[in-house]
Image (cartoon, rainbow, N blue to C red):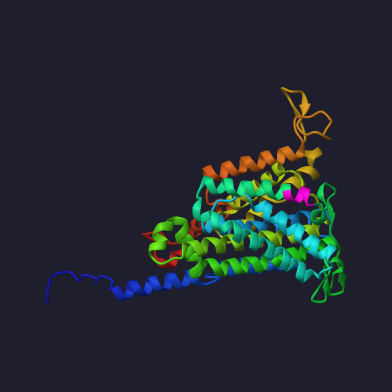
Amino acid sequence: MSDQPAVAPEPTSASTTEAETEEIASGLQLLPDTTSRVLVAASIATVALLPFFVSSDFWMTVLGAAGVFALGGLGLNLLTGYAGQVSLGQAAFVLIGAYVAAYFGVDQGWPMPLWMLAATMSGALIGAAIGPFALRFKGNYLVVVTLALVFVTVHVLRNWESFSGGLDGKSVSDASLWFGVDFANLTLFGKEFSRLQGIFYLTWFFVGLATLGMANIVRTRPGRALQAIRDRDIAAEVIGVRVARNKIIVFALSSALAGMAGGLDAVRTRFLTPGVAEAELLEGIRYVAVIVVGGIGTVTGAIVGALFLGPLPELIEQYSETINFTVPILDQPLLKASATSDGVMTTAVLSEILFGVLLVVFLMFQPRGLVGMFGNARRWLAAKRRPGPTEPADAAD
């Protein structure tokens, strides 16, 4: 017998391959762990039950607006977070989808499924038309192209009065029947819901569908192709990824979700005005802030960011008297009661400042956003539960 201590055999290539296979398989699963399944089930239950307990028009309006931001943010996160194509023009696609929905739903009398499809397809077609610019321009140059789209969109809508109503605006009818369900006069289990509660269900139903679709895209081959383009587009093309085709497709998908969000926003607000390009540009920056604060490059980041930032303007407006105070040096109230009254700024200006501050803070100190913070917290708690190196395995309890 040999006196040398037994040496544990090194892991074989078979065992390494098995571990790698398990890791890859986990990454391909839609809901890879119990925590994910519980969170999804809790989210669905919350959306389903919330209107039974919350009847306030204010909160239904706020949560409906957050749903629109979430839908548009999902598209932008797919484009920017996964494909690396930076855009400030998401608000332009939302605006286009809103007007297309209003035109076909009101002027042409189409039923809701058809004008929602038209709003979605209009965004997809215009996005596909913008996509080829991404083949030629990158980085800041692509941002300039999307900025130009905002100004062109607003100019066309302000002057194409037969389509948009021009500066007079355009009224939008309530949501009509959708497979036998009238969301403007919804009744479930004997309970009657208000119009805003019905629109809440409608909006978050589409958010759920878009989230499911995006989750399936990013966890499969198309999603890995987009991430390869984001990281190294030349290397991606070398290994066989069709960069040109994928860039055009992702622009079309992103814009389609924005068009869908616009159609839902038209139903929610019931009145559209083209506004000014500067306002739409700020709206585009809001969408960027939503995905950065929520978690860029994550499926749920847009939803978390929309729930965190989307209601901000309405909340500031609603509670302006509560949060207002006199600025000592200026001896004036912080918020103006009206556009002509004394004060440092309006509630709209304050909300834009907060959007900008939060965007900068998260980019500097938490670039992975709120979803990244939650992930860090989960890992920290999991590490705390594990036994220490000197503790027996059963001491964890």
Place of residue 116 in the rendered image (x, y in percent of width and height, measured from the top left)? 74, 66
Q: Which image quarter is the N terminus in?
A: bottom left
Residue drawn at x 18%, y 69% as measured from the top left? 5
Front one among 39 and 102: 102
Place of residue 326 in the rendered image (x, y in percent of width and height, measured from the top left)? 77, 28
Q: How many marks?
A: 0
Q: Characterize the magenta stretch by its predominant secondary structure.
A: helix
- Answer with the quarter of the image where residue 163 lies: bottom right
Residue drawn at x 81%, y 70% as measured from the top left? 111
The answer to whether residue 66 shows anywhere in this view is no
From what the image shows, is residue 44 above or below residue 364? below
Residue drawn at x 49%, y 58% as measured from the top left? 379
Place of residue 68 in the rendered image (x, y in percent of width and height, measured from the top left)? 71, 57
Front one among 19 and 233: 233
Front one among 372 and 120: 120
Residue drawn at x 57%, y 47% as measured from the top left? 143
The answer to whether residue 81 shows anywhere in this view is yes
- Would you say 22 lies left or right of 77 here? left
Q: Which residues are magenta?
A: 156-160
From what the image shows, is residue 171 above or below residue 241? above
- Residue 60 located within the stretch drawn in magenta: no
- Residue 159 located within the stretch drawn in magenta: yes
Place of residue 273 in the rendered image (x, y in percent of width and height, measured from the top left)? 80, 49
